[in-house]
Image (cartoon, helix red, strand yellow):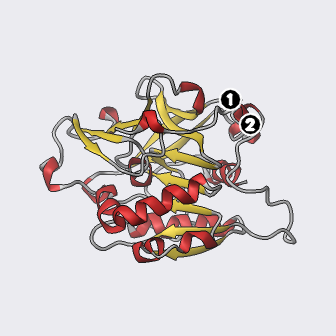
Amino acid sequence: MLYWRRRLAIVAVFSVAFALTPTLTSKAQPPVKIALYSQSTPPGADWRCVVAEKAMFESMGALVTEVYAADIIGGALTSYDVLVMPGGYAFYYKTALGDVGVDNIRKFVANGGGYIGICAGAWFAVDYDLWYGIVYEYPLDLFPGYGEGPVPELTPGYPEPPRPVDAGLYCRDYIPVMTEINLANGNGITGGLSTDSLMVMYWGGPTFHVCEGHEEEVAVIGTYAVHQNEPAMVAFEYGSGKVFLTGVHPEFEEESTLDGLTFDNHLYDPESEWPLMLDVLT
């Protein structure tokens, strides 16, 4: 475990603002260039997450390009402002990217790039996963702590997994459910929202646990109301870059086709989470 080797800056800036990129205030300003990891074979990025995240960020005026493991290994991230790692299967992110790809992501963020990790993309960025009580090491190691999951209250059949854990679990093994996320104050992201909580889709993501001595480096953006207010969304700096991780899926517009999908339209969602993600991006 490498969390004690980090050189993260103390995040006093969270009391002022947290932004992955310069604010988009006009069309004259260069649009944010997003690299959206889209490799789905072997089981990796879930296509539904990719479709929804592309629709969401394009609605904000960003230029979104789907990238694959070979692109990242080849150094393509230098052409982008932000890397988005979507929901899917974090284990195969690790195997597809290998040591070179993982190191290129780490350097990209440390040198000033932004990283948005959603569900599997968040699992991929922690020091290690505690999954059904089993520890799985992950080498990217941006977050000074570990992820734990799935959330028992949001996982039908828990503590029994839908199939043997050693066989690998993918989001398709789970039933997506809506859950209330309580929003924190004073972090530069949620201040512009008119609500103190959001209903967001949960689909097998983590809670976040910061290692002792690193608490002031991480801003908690939202917590699971159903699970003792454990952190569900966090933001922090890594080197010169900024990171936002979420265990829930703000990209999906349930009851709507704005996200380009219909599989989630049966779920009740009284408001959009896209304004929150716009605040993350800008």
Q: What's the residue at 40%, 70% (across, down)?
A: 47
Tell me whether circle 1 and circle 2 mark residues in contact (CB < 8 Å).
yes
Visible residue check, residue 261: no
Graded by Cα atoms within 10 Å as few (under 14), some (14 to 19) or many (20 or more), the crowding at tag 2 reads some
Residue marked by disc 2 = 191
- Left or right of residue 168: residue 102: right
Residue 70 visible in the snapshot: yes
Q: In the structure shown, which secondary structural element does the residue marked by tag 1 occupy?
A: loop
Q: Amino acid at mark 1?
A: Asn
Provide residue 212's location: percent of width, then percent of height: 45, 22
Q: Residue 70: x and y, percent?
A: 41, 77
Q: Quadrant of the C terminus?
A: bottom right
Residue at image position (29%, 40%) is 155
Q: Position of residue 210 (x, y in %)?
A: 46, 30
- Judging from the image, what secondary structure is the residue with disc 2 in? helix
Callout 2 amino acid: Gly
Q: Residue at x 36, y 60 (%)?
A: 88
Q: Residues within 10 Å of mark 1 (few under 14, many from 20)?
A: some
Q: Depth check: 44 or 101 in front?
A: 101
First in sequence: mark 1 vs mark 2: 1
Residue identified by numbered label 1: 185
The answer to whether residue 5 is left or right of residue 1 is: right
Does 87 appear above or below 280? below
